Amino acid sequence: MTIDLQKIEFVKACLRLEFQDPYELTVENLLRLRRNLRQAARQIELLSTRSNGLAFDELFDPPVSPDPYARRRYQLPGPPFVIHPPRNHSLPVEIHGILELPIVLFGRGTLLLKELCLAFQALGTQGFHRGEGLFELAAVEAEDLSGNRMRIWQRSGQAPMPLPLIHAGWWLDTFAEESEVCLLLHTPARILSDGRPLFNPCFRTLFPFILRRVTAMVHAHCGLELVDDPAIYLTAAGRVHELENRLAWRDWRSLDGNGRKQDLGGLVGSLKIGGEGLREVLWLLRLASLLNLGKGATYGAGHLVFGDMA
């Protein structure tokens, strides 16, 4: 690695949503938050003229780099927050039931937690989808480096607590070295290669998307060049061995338009890997687990976790 990873900061927050009516939470409704959340935020007028200088556009539409080299090298910057869907992402929620929604705020996005919470408060008055799933933001918690949670805000009016910033270098040091790991995609990762879905993925074809996502987010929101030469890590990925591959493309909803129906889907399942190249790329895979993969990654799609074979 070519930079001081201590310069990469993030916050692991958890929004506690209290539902006002029974609601059947589904993966489809979770992954379709983008439009509703943006509309809710606009209704409360998070404008770029706010006194603190943090713009609505910075939260949902971060600016493209003015550097022409960076524009060629990196994909368009995604928002500086990432929703991590609950592992059991299809479940009924009762009246006054609590849904914990983990969110990572990355780099400069750590300064935008208040604005993101305001957007969710506004969303709660509209509901998750089509007026259903009304909720109130009951509390916000954050996790420190040791994994301990602290309540940093609650509806009763307690004064906000300081954010526990996590430095990526220290965070990565909490993981033991491993000779093999299992990666799980438990929400669909819509990954396209040359405009076509990646129907038959292997680690070698998947890794470039992981590298691109991580380096683009670090550049956009931390202002850092994460790697000097991507070819070094692409070569190392070629020395990673697949021990078991259970990744598959799964359609999760259909989109109607122009008189035809189009299936929307993504990769889900598990991939067990090892080999001599793993040590060189494992830190990148860990960072990717914070950021999700593919189209809609900000809103919960392509959630990558470490675990056991699915």
Image (cartoon, rainbow, N blue to C red):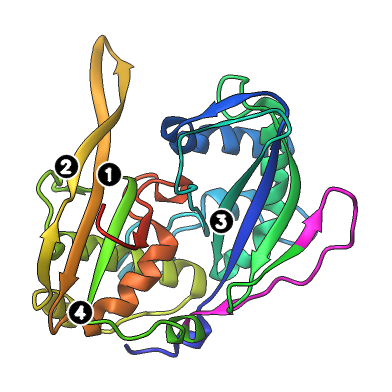
Judge the density around disc 1: few (<14), some (14-19), many (≥20) Cα neighbours within 10 Å. Answer: many
Q: Secondary structure at mark 2?
A: strand
The residue beneath circle 2 is: 197
First in sequence, mark 3 or 1: give its number.
3
The relative height of residue 273 versus residue 55 in the rendered view (above or below) is below
Q: Secondary structure at mark 4?
A: helix
Relative depth, front residue between 61 and 97: 97
Q: Residue 74 occupies which quadrant of the picture?
A: bottom left
Q: Label 4 to label 3, Cα distance in Å?
A: 27 Å
First in sequence, mark 2 or 4: give its number.
2
First in sequence, mark 3 or 2: give its number.
3
Q: Identity of the amino acid at label 4? A: Leu
The relative height of residue 213 versus residue 9 in the rendered view (above or below) is above
Mark yes or no: residue 72 visible: no
Measuring from the top left, give residue 117's x and y in whole percent: 70, 49
The residue beneath circle 4 is: 278
The relative height of residue 111 versus residue 249 in the rendered view (above or below) is below
First in sequence, mark 4 or 1: give its number.
1
The reply to whether dot 2 and dot 1 touch (C-beta < 8 Å) is yes
The disc label shown at residue 103, or none: 3
- Where does the magenta region start and end? 152-168
